[in-house]
């Protein structure tokens, strides 16, 4: 990942969400983007120019735009009309974002336009976040990676964030993903965790 000093940046057309510019690069704000927070709070995975990414929960394209600065193509799924309008504007100014208005819990809706991806990234505040992720693993290449941004309070408000975090890791492991990193995103995003996995080369259950 590109850093100027300690500051995480990406190189692309700016002005997406009022981000600061530093030496012609876009400052990637960890308080605005959970993926940036992962690069500060943990390790994450390196984004590279040849990568294809499926991004679930694109919202208005804040993080999508930074990911698109690094990779070949981003398939960006969002189901809410208002953020989709902003996402379309972000996609209009780049040639490697494919906006898809669809429900991430129903991957059959966008399967016809998908290709196999190197990275599956998910940031949807839903009760069944792990199950949505698992359903979308169908698009992962054999050596693909997964990043789940887990909003613990959306899964079950009666359980502690720690319990939801642990149970989600167990569910992904039981499915057959190998968890390679798990970290809270504090102080950037309260009660949010990131779980980074890779697909076993022998495949998942
Ligand atoms: C926390 S926001 C995502 C922020 C975004 N990832 C970023 O960093 O710029 C979550 C988004 O997921 C969308 N979302 C939630 N459930 C969804 C689903 N089942 N399918 C598609 N989008 C969904 C919401 O509409 C919302 O825009």
Image: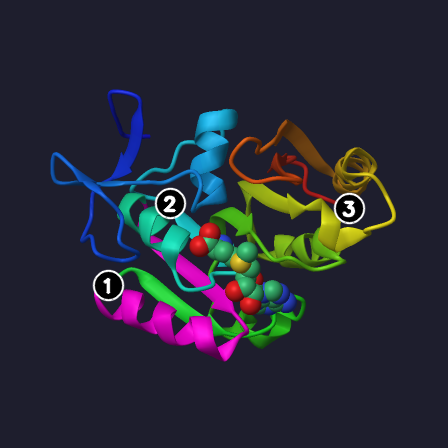
Using a 10 Å C-alpha cutoff, classify the residue at mark 2 as few (fewer than 14 neighbours), some (14 to 19) or many (20 or more). some
> Which is more N-terminal, label 2 or label 1?
2
On screen, residue 22 versus residue 109, left or right, reads left
The image quadrant that residue 73 belongs to is bottom left
Q: How crowded is mark 1: few (under 14 residues within 10 Å), some or many (20 or more)?
A: few
Q: Nearer the viewer, mark 3 or mark 2?
A: 2
The residue lying at 81 percent from left, 51 percent from top is 157
Q: In which quarter of the image is the N terminus?
A: top left
- Residue 114 is left or right of residue 200, and the answer is left
**Residue 190 placed where, x, y %?**
61, 39
Residue occupying the point 62% across, 28% down: 183
Residue span colored magenta: 71-93
Q: Where is residue 177? Give x, y as percent.
A: 69, 38
**SS label for mark 3:** loop
Between residue 48 and residue 143, name the one nearer to us. Answer: 48
- Residue assigned mark 3: 205
Marks 1 and 2 sit apart, C-alpha to C-alpha, by: 15 Å
- Say which of marks 1 and 2 sits in front: 1
User: Is residue 75 found inside the magenta-colored segment of the image?
Assistant: yes
Foreground residue among 204 and 14 = 14
Say whether marks 3 and 2 touch (CB < 8 Å). Answer: no
The residue that disc 2 covers is 51
Which residue matches tag 1? 95
Give the farthest residue toward the bottom: 81
């Amino acid at each position: 990942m590109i850093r100027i000093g300690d500051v995480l940046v990406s190189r692309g057309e700016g002005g997406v969400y009022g981000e600061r510019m530093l030496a012609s690069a876009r400052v990637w704000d960890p308080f605005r983007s959970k993926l940036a927070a992962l690069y500060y709070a943990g390790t994450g995975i390196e984004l590279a120019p040849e990568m294809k990414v499926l991004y679930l929960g694109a919202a208005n394209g804040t993080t999508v735009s930074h990911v698109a600065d690094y990779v070949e193509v981003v398939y960006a799924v969002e189901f809410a009309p208002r953020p989709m309008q902003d996402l379309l504007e972000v996609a209009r100014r780049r040639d490697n974002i494919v906006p898809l208005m669809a429900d991430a819990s129903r991957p059959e809706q966008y399967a016809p336009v998908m290709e196999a991806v190197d990275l599956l990234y998910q940031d949807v505040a839903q009760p069944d976040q792990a199950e949505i992720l698992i359903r979308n693993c169908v698009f992962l290449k054999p050596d693909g990676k997964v990043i789940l941004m887990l909003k613990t309070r959306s899964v079950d408000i009666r359980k502690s964030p720690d319990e939801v975090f642990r149970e989600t890791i167990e569910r992904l492991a039981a499915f057959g993903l190998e968890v390679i990193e798990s970290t809270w995103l504090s102080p950037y995003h309260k009660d949010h965790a990131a779980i980074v996995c890779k697909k076993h080369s022998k495949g998942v259950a």
